[in-house]
Image (cartoon, grey):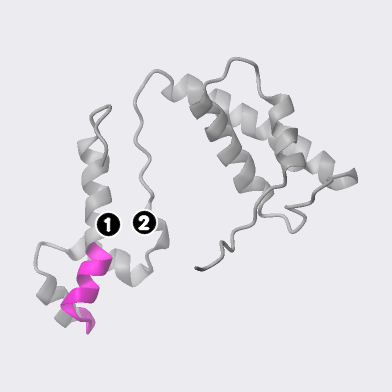
Amino acid sequence: MAMDKRKRLSAAEAAVLDQQLPAGLTEDMQDVAFCLFEAMATTDRRAGSPRPEGAWLDVLHSMARVAVIQLQHLAQEKGGRSVYLSKCSVFHLSARDREMCAKFRGDYEALADEYGLTVMRVRQIVDPWQREWFLTRQGRLPGIPD
C-alpha cells in the first residue's frame, strides 16, 4: 500500500485553528475551516511540527484568522444553500487535456486520432471531466449519494 505523501498538520498546529473557531459551528463548517487552514499551512516547510513556537506559531495564528474570515464570508455568501464542490479534475488537466475536453463531441476515436492517443486513454481523460461538468450543471438531490 502506498503511503500518503501529503503534508499533514500536527494536533498542536490544528489546535491553533480550534482556539479561534466560534462556538456553535456545525461539523461541516468546522471541516471547511480546517480545509482552508490546512491548505495554507501545509504550503510551509514547517508544517507538521509537533510543538509549533516562535515565528511559526505566529504564522499559524495569522492563517487561522484568515481561515475564519474566509469561512464567515462563505457563510454570508453561500449560507443556507446546497453547494456542490466537485473534485475539480480540471485543475489536474494539462493544457492539451483541457483542449481535448473542450473539443469532445462524443467521438472518442476522432480525438484519439487527432491527439495520437488510444481511445482508452481519451476516455480516461474525458470521462471524469465530463462527469464533473455534468454534476456542476445538474446539481444533486439531497440525501442521494453518487
Drawn side of residue 35 relative to residue 95, left or right: right
Q: For residue 117, which numbered disc appears in the image? A: none
The one nearer the camera, 26 or 134, is: 26
Measured along the vertical axis of the image, is residue 23 above or below residue 62?
Answer: above
Q: Residue furthest right?
A: 54
State if disc 1 and disc 2 touch (CB < 8 Å). Answer: yes
Mark 2 or 1 closer to N-term?
2
Measured along the vertical axis of the image, is residue 107 above or below residue 58?
Answer: below
Tell me the crowding category of disc 2: few under 14, some 14 to 19, or many 20 or more residues within 10 angstroms, Cα based.
some
Report the number of discs.
2
Q: For residue 89, which numbered disc appears in the image? A: 2
Drawn side of residue 45 relative to residue 134, left or right: right
Identify which residue is drawn at 27% across, 27% down: 142
Give amino acid for label 1.
Answer: Trp
Q: Which residues are magenta?
A: 115-126
Q: Main secondary structure of the magenta part?
A: helix
Where residue 145 sits, quadrant-wise, is top left
Tell me the crowding category of disc 1: few under 14, some 14 to 19, or many 20 or more residues within 10 angstroms, Cα based.
many
In percent of width and height, residue 23 lies at 64, 16
Where residue 67 sits, quadrant-wise, is top right
Identify which residue is drawn at 63% across, 28% down: 68
Drawn side of residue 29 relative to residue 9, left or right: left
In percent of width and height, residue 77 lies at 45, 23
Identify which residue is drawn at 9% across, 63% down: 106
Measured along the vertical axis of the image, is residue 131 above or below residue 122?
Answer: above
Q: Residue furthest front?
A: 1
Give amino acid for label 2.
Answer: Ser
In percent of width and height, residue 119 lies at 16, 76
Residue 51: in magenta span: no
Where residue 129 sits, quadrant-wise, is bottom left
Q: Which residue is mark 1?
A: 129
Identify which residue is drawn at 22% across, 60% down: 127
